[in-house]
Image (cartoon, rainbow, N blue to C red):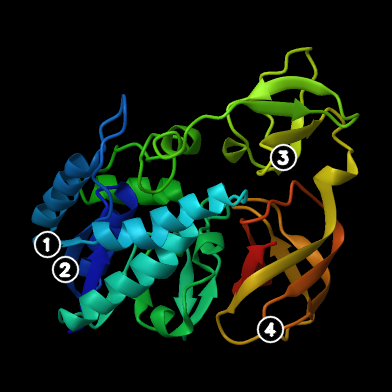
Amino acid sequence: MKTVYVGMSGGVDSSVSAALLKQQGYNVVGVYMKNWSRDLPGLSCPWKEDYQDAKRVAVQLGIDFKMYDFEKDYQQKVVDYMLDGFKAGITPNPDIMCNQEIKFKLFLDTALEDGADLIATGHYASTKNGRLFAAKDDNKDQTYFLYRVTKEALQKTIFPLGEYTKPQVRQLAKKFKLVTADKKESMGICFVGKVGIKEFLEQYVDKQSGKIINQKGEVIGRHDGAIFYTIGQRHGLDVGGGLPYYVTGKDMDKNEVYVTSDLQDSKLWNREIKFTSAHWINGEPKAAKLAARTRHRAKLIPVKKLNKLSNSQWVAELNEYVRALTPGQSAVFYAEDECLGGGIVS
């Protein structure tokens, strides 16, 4: 009988994953990863409650349960990475880095040393022979966040929810009578629960007022700091005048944010994606028909041509324009329902 260590976050998805694996005859061990415990002004971190929920489910299922404290590694590999990115004027994705460095590296290595044969998580994705495939539920598919996981890690991973839709997972939770069956999903960045990115950043950087400049070069308002704004952003721009404005760029040295009221502004649209730090799960793509996704749940855009410019630089020419391509975010490539990998938009 194979031993599977399941990352249990206290949510319904990982709870059902553990229940399904037990039903399938695995020796299941539940693991709560303590990645973040710090409270923020006005909001307490829900880690204790999540830990208790995960533990209750483990008791219900009659499986062993333990906690791994990854807080120090998480701070260095995810939080500091994110803060450095924002300070440099790009928009990093902490969830992708968390999967690469914590869940499918640190958790995997720790679990294997601890006696696991395999690990499992509640991600909506499928894996087979070290390859990564989209989940059955298009709306919940999380392969975009998993594209930097290695082939070797995928060979040791089970995604029990790959063939289920979210409503089916809720039904299963009720059928298994799990205490998390009706628990709401936590939104916001992966480790801060209900706190948005701006509120989180405000704990680490001082607000610094600067100019908001429109497409004609006119100063039309002030902002709290260029660091808080991202390409394509529409909300949180205090400029008045009735017209919606969109962020098209920013200058971190001058602390200026550039906006446009023209949704067709060429600065908002791209037909090519330049990216670095490429990670291909099973080698560089050979497929004739590729499609790219530039944010979670964005539609797949057919790729005309994918070129390697150097060891670190790639460019993808698209068949149509993509809106608000954001440096620091990821471009992820697919051949039908297989996720091949991708890189960081430059």
Crowd class of label 4 (few under 14; some 14 to 19; many from 20; radius 10 Å): few
Mark nearest the camera among 3 and 4 is 4
Mark seen at residue 289: none
**Of the image marks 4 and 2, the number of the one nearer the N terminus:** 2
Mark nearest the camera among 4 and 1 is 4
Point out residue 90 in the picture as x, y percentages from the top left corner: 62, 51
Secondary structure at badge 4 equals loop
Q: Are marks 4 and 2 in contact (CB under 8 Å)?
A: no
Q: Which residue is mark 4?
A: 311
Label 2 and label 3: CA atoms lie apart by 43 Å
Rendered image quadrant of residue 309: bottom right
Label 3 and label 4: CA atoms lie apart by 29 Å
Q: Which residue is mark 2?
A: 29
Eyeballing the image, is 208 above or below 155?
above
Amino acid, disc 2: Val
Q: Is residue 64 left or right of residue 21?
A: left
Secondary structure at badge 1 equals strand
Q: Quadrant of the N terminus?
A: bottom left
